[in-house]
Image: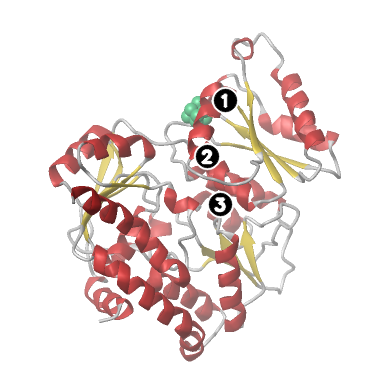
Amino acid sequence: MSAAEAAARDQASSTCATLEITRERGQRQVFCGLAGIVWLHRKIQDAFFLIVGSRTCAHLMQSAAGVMIFAEPRFATAILQERDLAGMADCNQELDRVAAEVLERRPDIKTLFLVGSCPSEVIKLDLGKAAERLSEVYRERVRVIDYSASGLETTFTQGEDVCLKSLVPQMPQLPSGERSLLVVGTLPDVVEDQFARLFKDLGIGPVHFLPPRHATEFPPVGDGTSVLLAQPFVGETLRALVERGATLLKAPYPFGIEGTLAWLRAAADAWGVSSETLDAVTAPAIARAETALARQRQLLAGKRISFLPDSQLEIPMARFLRRECGMELVEVATPFLDRQLMEAELPLLPEGLRLVEGQDVEHQLDRAREDRPDITVCGLGLANPLEAEGLRTKWSIELVFTPVHGFDQAADLAELFARPLVRGSLLKV
Ligand code: SF4
């Protein structure tokens, strides 16, 4: 049976599934929203992210970025010193000086993001005012936008959400009577190009992507905008778009064959594209994906997996790994569960699943030790201790650093989870 057939069978039997969600509150072990800068700065090619923070923030960025290899970064930290934190220095003057230095050195920068942190919030540095002031100074040359990525009660993917939300007021108005599709959530360029081709072949358009590749090309938004979410952690951005008239197309997320097909179908239905056309356009990519995925399915089928709450990608990943790769879900924990964003995903999870919202890290680790799943998906900070206890792990942050959306990446996504298992079996030999 093919992965798509297996998925269709499961869908029929689980649409009535009742899911009980356990809420946990306790100590958390997550990266803050600053980590989002690592992939956002790669996507928006003419933007610079200036973090207004402490040495801790700079170290966090270094660790998050340290797992990637790529060209010159377009982010930096303006470090608040003890004198600043004690209110003995004018931080605004220092911020203006650092911004001037950055913009002089990097004439290619068209948007400067001032990114707030815990320290900048503690001293109540008004980055909104600073952005207004700097926008005035660099008028016509650079747009200056502020957002805050601070907080211990956040997740690292929320950094993208607050950043994209800060762009919404800058988006031009879609003229009344016009319609367009807006895909929201960062996609690697190669994946964005694949989706753009599929939408074109389906006759759906115009299609825009948020974030755009260049900060000078903000997509329009208005009453005629239909939104498809590419990432399950952009709820605040969605609500800001809805306030400007946009409508959400409800769909699972485009991970795996099943998710991608259902996601495209939501747009196809909104544009009145027939099922026959959708099937014809997607058939070659689905056939390729099924062949590639079959190899990974052999490695993953029957293996047990647990998710610790970290990326907000846990639910769609669990759906894909169970329904298309045959994995057994031991526990799926997610930091926040936004029911609106998960409406099309939750019915695809199996009845009786141990689904947890929130974190109490010690309890979750105890359960992982007791369950001893074949693989545990977790944050960077928890992976090494679990590996030391003989548990195989996968860093959840890799799911946002690697192209994993769409048909052509379905097997790569499965391979991300198969790799630690293969490595583990080699180590045992
Ligand atoms: S949690 Fe706060 S202090 Fe720590 S790195 Fe993030 S913004 Fe900086």
- The answer to which of marks 1 and 3 sits earlier in the sequence is 1
Where disc 1 sits, the SS reads helix
Residue 252 numbered tag: none
Please name whichever residue, 250 or 417, is drawn nearer the observer in this view of the structure.
Answer: 417
Please state which of the two labelled residues, at mark 2 or mark 3, is closer to the viewer: 2
Residue 65 numbered tag: 2
Q: Is residue 24 left or right of residue 218?
A: left
Please name whichever residue, 373 or 362, is drawn nearer the observer in this view of the structure.
Answer: 373
Residue 237 numbered tag: 3
Where disc 2 sits, the SS reads helix
- The answer to which of marks 1 and 2 sits earlier in the sequence is 2
Crowding near pointer 1: few (<14 within 10 Å), some, many (20+)? some
Where disc 3 sits, the SS reads helix
Up/down of 223 relative to 281, above or below? above
| Residue under the point 43% across and 78% down | 288
Query: Decide: marks 1, 3 in contact (CB < 8 A)?
Result: no
Distance of label 1 from label 2 (alpha carbons): 23 Å
Q: Residue furthest front?
A: 429
Residue corresponding to mark 1: 121
Distance of label 2 from label 3 (alpha carbons): 24 Å
| Residue under the point 51% across and 28% down | 59
